[in-house]
Amino acid sequence: MLWNTGLWNTGTRNTGSWDTELTRRLGLRLPVVQGPLGGGLSSVALVGAVADAGGLGSFGVHHLAPQALLDTAALLRARTSAPFALNLWMPCAYRQQKHIEPVQFARTLELLAPFYDELGLALPEAPPAAWPDEREQMEALLEARPAVFSFVFGIPPDDVLRRCRQLGILTLGAATTVAEARALEAAGVDMLVASGAEAGGHRVAFLEPPERGLIGLFALLPQVVDAVQIPVIGAGGIADGRGMAAALLLGAQGVQLGTAFLACEESAASAVQRASLFQPQASDTVLTRVFSGRLARGIHNEFVERLQTVEHSLPGYPLLNSLTAELKRAAVARQRPELMSLWSGQSAGLLRHRNAGAVLAALEGQAQALLGRL
Ligand SMILES: Cc1cc2nc3c(=O)[nH]c(=O)nc-3n(C[C@H](O)[C@H](O)[C@H](O)COP(=O)(O)O)c2cc1C
């Protein structure tokens, strides 16, 4: 019976509640995290809708300057009194590049020029030079004091983790391998997301280049659960109650979904981007560096196809991300999905719902029924 799995406390199915480390620690009704969507794809509406339905909403703020981060936290607080997560990217040596020599800049512009032309944009005259400082972002996050500080691409400095503990901010790291899970636990992080290679968006490896650790969630999750004592949340390829039930049975204390929430009307994705997730082509995803300079999973399209063979000569992150930012914006404005960064995980073919409440209701109902049959 479901309640014998230790995940569900009830005598009757209609009045019970989920009972995992995640729900207990944060007072959630559901062991479900709406994964942070970086680069402007998170929204207050999405976090609020997830919170209303009993899950944990997350807002990706890695691209925001400190004041904008604080403003976002204030908007979230105005929308919901429930806990939410703010998510940052840690400085990570892998394919990081903030300076570009004139020769490489010229060569990069040569490769991108056909796209600037096609979208009617002028080529940039100088390389981008400034990005938000990660340390300042962490200070702003501490000031904002969300219930959860989630982060990827590494581990925050010891003093930041210590101050999180003092302020009662739960820390949630991300691991793509068992070694990364152990490193997060050893640093004193409270919980971790085991991120399978099926996941949409960036591969968030930080100990080895991501190509070395492309482990699917079915293999990764039980190994991580065996390796660490802290609670583990499963992510990557989960889009319905079958995936949720399987992850819980593999030892997860919760699940994190990104693609399924990106597809919801509350996300900040454009209508074209959301619609692309429901097309048959969405089952054809690829890991590519051509948009940001770092490896990320998205739908295979013309932009990827035309640059894939030269991706190794393109600059790293965040330089390339900034150089393609205007292209990506213009492709959205002109409704040209073939030139957009269509981030998606491998679960797109499972998507059925277009708002967060429906996603969560379906997840809960199906997982509960499946676990109840055991
Ligand atoms: C468009 C997009 C942007 C994402 N941005 C971030 C981010 O900024 N920070 C982060 O921790 N995870 C990010 N993720 C990962 C998700 O939060 C989540 O872990 C992942 O999507 C789960 O796998 P799934 O896509 O198969 O559901 C992103 C995912 C997508 C699809």
Image (spheres, grey):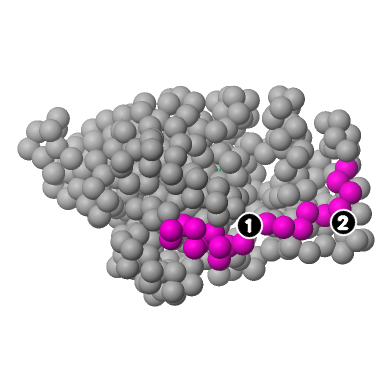
Crowd class of label 2 (few under 14; some 14 to 19; many from 20; radius 10 Å): some
Q: Is residue 140 magenta?
A: yes
Indicate left or right for 331 with 252 as reference.
Answer: right
Nearest the viewer among 67 and 63 is 67
Please tell me which residue is depicted at 29% across the width and 37% down the height of the picture.
Answer: 54
- Which is more N-terminal, label 2 or label 1? 2
Which portion, as a residue range, is magenta? 123-143
Residue 195 appears in the figure: no
Left or right: 309, with 11 as reference point: right
Q: Is residue 9 left or right of residue 143?
A: left
Callout 2: helix, strand or loop?
Answer: helix
Name which residue lies at 20% across and 48% down. 19
Does the Cβ of the disc 1 residue fall within 8 Å of ligand 1?
Answer: no
247 falls in the magenta region: no
Q: Position of residue 124 (x, y in %)?
A: 86, 46
Which residue position holds label 1?
A: 132
Q: Depth check: give the residue in front, 194 or 51.
A: 51
Name the amino acid type tagged 2.
Answer: Phe
When asked about the image quadrant of residue 225, the answer is bottom left
Q: Nearer the viewer, residue 289 or 264?
A: 264
Q: Which residue is mark 2?
A: 105
| Quadrant position of the N terminus in the picture | top left
